[in-house]
Image (spheres, helix red, strand yellow):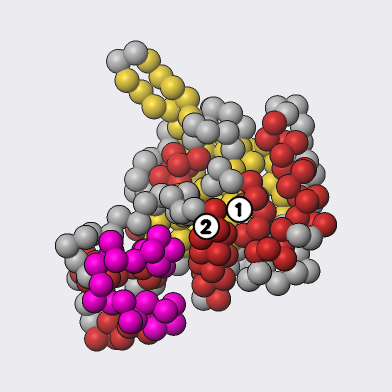
Amino acid sequence: MELLLSLQDISYAYHNLKGETPALSHISFEVSQGEFLAIVGPSGCGKSTLLSIIAGLLAPEKGSLFYRGQYVSDCGLRDVMKVGYMLQRDHLFEWRTIYKNVLLGLELNHALTGENIDYVLKLLKDYDLYAFRDKKPSELSGGMRQRAALIRTMAIRPDLFLLDEPFSALDSQTRLNVSADIAQIIRGTNKTAILITHDLSEAVTLADRVLVLSKRPACVKCEMPIHFDTDRSDPLAVRNSAKYRLYFNQLWEVLTNEQTAVPTN
């Protein structure tokens, strides 16, 4: 696969009047076009900080980002590619209909063209929300709201999806189905995704590769490619497979033992 994104020796610390709090320490990894990468690590280790640096919301104190081999400035990827960002909550506006909510990104980018509106309508039909386009967010289930948030993100046709625990507010059953559904949607369009999650099961079920970070200041402990013979659109079949249990146990050992490492090949 073609190399899309490269992070080299990224470090970052937060500063206040009481001093410095290191968050990231010499992080390096690559992401290929069309890859679904999951990043896991202890709570508070800096996963969301890393995602903010990739998005250009924060500038690294040390290290460099490269997009398709070209150096990216401190402003991050937004200067060279379209980045879609999904947060823990869907952030749909209650005073806007679902249709108006999914158009928001296009409005902010002054891109409400006929072609883009037709694309949004197609997405609403493809993902079973067209019949609910005139409803308010409170009239939809949590899973449907997340699909609406995904369509809002997809409407700007991003090259890279940054997913910061977007399923954490859902109940377990809905989370399992919606996360698998959204992963399939992203894969089906050959887009690239980086998922931040605390849920190791979710990472193994969804990702092509899992990156494990240490406690703060975070460094890369291991990278594990994930390969299943089972259809990835069926999350229960994936979780019932022997490979799932093997991946889960290996990654759990790395997460819970600071001295443990897992081969990256």
Question: Most prominent secondary structure in the magenta stretch?
Answer: helix
Residue drawn at (82%, 57%) of the image = 242
Does the residue at mark 2 contact the one at mark 1 (Cβ under 8 Å)?
yes
x and y percentages locating residue 172 in the rendered image: 54, 53
Earlier in the chain: of badge 2 and badge 1, it is: 2
Q: What is the crowding at mark 1: few (fewer than 14 residues within 10 Å), some, or many (at least 20)?
A: many
x and y percentages locating residue 157 in the rendered image: 39, 72
Which residue carries the number 2 mark?
A: 175
| Residue type marked 1 | Glu
Q: What is the crowding at mark 2: few (fewer than 14 residues within 10 Å), some, or many (at least 20)?
A: some
Q: Quadrant of the N terminus?
A: bottom right
Mark 2–mark 1 Cα distance, whole angstroms, equals: 9 Å
Residue drawn at (59%, 38%) of the image = 41
Which residue carries the number 1 mark?
A: 202
Vertical placement of residue 74 versus 94, above or below: above
For the record, the magenta segment spans: 124-147
Which residue ends up furthest to the left in the rendered image? 95
Residue drawn at (45%, 67%) of the image = 159
Q: Secondary structure at mark 2?
A: helix
